[in-house]
Image (spheres, helix red, strand yellow):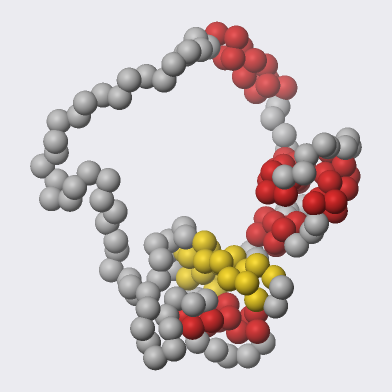
Amino acid sequence: MEINVGKEVAGLERMTVGELRTRYAEVFGEATNAHHKQWLVRRIIWRMQATVDGDLSERARQRARELANDADLRVSAPKANKVAPSSSPHPPGATLRIATDNRLPMPGTIITREYKGRTLQIRVLKQGFEFEGESFKSLSAVAEKITGSHCNGFLFFHLIKEGGGR
């Protein structure tokens, strides 16, 4: 049995904290005192994936315990190394942008929009977009899925203003 993580997460995000706490108890077999919605969603989806894909083997658990016992724990963070300047034409920390539509954010960005009482989240992919576990070729296709009618995806997600300006 497989789960569609995107759809499951979308369903969990529509739940109230009380409903998530109930779902947590169903999935984990014990109640929680947590009231942090995002934490509850992440823990529930993690447990659902672990149940479907299988948890760690006993051998892996034993090895993890051995590694944890042998680990030398640091009390403070390591000091940053001074690195010689590189001969790169780009300054350190500069983000390189691939030639794509300049109206779109970088792949991996989440576009968020409120619509009819729902918070919509669309992930920008290298080739297309993801919404509730489904892939779409264009923002207009996502907007059509949401509204039921064709509309300009850039306008719907407020990436451009009426008249073409940003």
Q: Position of residue 3 (x, y in %)?
A: 72, 55
> Is residue 58 placed above or below 13 in the rendered structure?
above
Q: Position of residue 133 (x, y in %)?
A: 64, 64
Query: Which of the 4 image quadrants contains residue 135?
Result: bottom right
Residue furthest left in the image: 87
In this rendering, the count of numbered labels is 0
Q: Nearer the viewer, residue 119 or 11?
A: 119
In the picture, measured across the screen, residue 37 lies left or right of residue 30, that is left
Let me know if residue 7 appears in the view: yes
> What residue do we see at 28% from left, 68% from top?
99
Q: Position of residue 108 (x, y in %)?
A: 46, 58
In the picture, measured across the screen, residue 15 lies left or right of residue 118, that is right
> What residue do we see at 69% from left, 44% from top?
39
Query: Which of the 4 image quadrants contains residue 117?
Result: bottom right
In the picture, measured across the screen, residue 73 lies left or right of residue 55, that is left
Quarter of the C terminus within the rendering: bottom left
Let me know if residue 139 appears in the view: no
Q: Nearer the viewer, residue 138 or 110?
A: 110
> What residue do we see at 40% from left, 71% from top?
104
Q: Position of residue 29 (x, y in %)?
A: 89, 37
In the picture, measured across the screen, residue 90 lies left or right of residue 130, that is left
> What residue do we see at 47% from left, 60% from top?
109
